[in-house]
Image: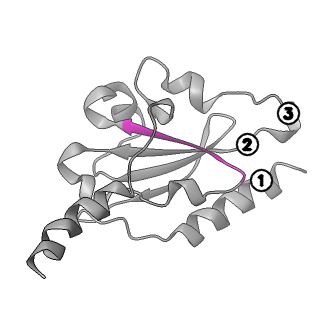
């Protein structure tokens, strides 16, 4: 039993690993949120950006790979002070949904440093932005 308790923290952190290609910083932030996909202007996917902090990695957005019809990026707030300031990020995690470079929706961690939203709520906002952009 004591071995199981030792493994629990490692199991939970293994679920939040984000491949290198999904990390952005100040040098490529604006390019990524304005990125045009190969599908043409009418089919540009919204971009979901998570502002992340090492000190609160236990509360990071762990379900990013479940998002559909959107592009996900993670930003280390220590490596993106300009983006952090521009988008008034005060807590980590903070998730911002962009469409064509325009901020559409923001979800911010509370004082408990936990994100008060679900994958379903984020996906619903993605779906709404996609639907609205087709008109």
| Mark 3–mark 2 distance (CA, rounded to whole Å) | 9 Å
Label 2 Cα neighbours within 10 Å, binned few <14 / some 14-19 / many ≥20: many
Residue annotated with mark 2: 45
Residue annotated with mark 1: 130
Query: Height in image: 77 above or below 128?
Result: above
Label 3 Cα neighbours within 10 Å, binned few <14 / some 14-19 / many ≥20: few
Kindly state the secondary structure of the residue where label 3 is placed: loop
Q: Is residue 70 part of the magenta span, yes or no?
A: yes
Q: Residue at x 13, y 72 (%)?
A: 3
Residue sitting farthest toward the left: 2
The answer to which image quadrant residue 53 occupies is top left
In front of the other: 52 or 66: 66
Kindly state the secondary structure of the residue where label 1 is placed: helix
Q: Which residues are magenta?
A: 69-75
Q: Is residue 130 part of the magenta span, yes or no?
A: no
In front of the other: 88 or 123: 123
Q: Are marks 3 and 2 in contact (CB under 8 Å)?
A: yes
Q: Are marks 2 and 1 in contact (CB under 8 Å)?
A: yes
Residue annotated with mark 3: 39
| Mark 1–mark 3 distance (CA, rounded to whole Å) | 14 Å
């Amino acid at each position: 039993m004591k071995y199981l308790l030792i493994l629990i923290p490692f199991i939970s952190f293994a679920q939040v690993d984000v491949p290198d290609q999904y990390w952005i910083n100040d040098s490529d932030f604006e390019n990524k949120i304005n990125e045009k996909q190969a599908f043409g202007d009418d089919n540009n996917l919204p971009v979901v950006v998570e502002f992340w902090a090492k000190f609160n990695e236990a509360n990071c957005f762990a379900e990013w790979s479940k998002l559909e019809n959107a592009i996900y990026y993670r930003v280390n707030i220590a490596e993106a002070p300009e983006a952090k300031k521009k988008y008034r990020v005060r807590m980590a995690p903070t998730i911002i949904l962009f469409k064509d470079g325009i901020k559409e929706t923001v979800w911010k961690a509370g004082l408990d440093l936990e994100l008060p939203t679900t994958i379903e709520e984020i996906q619903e906002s993605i779906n709404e932005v996609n639907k609205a952009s087709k008109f």
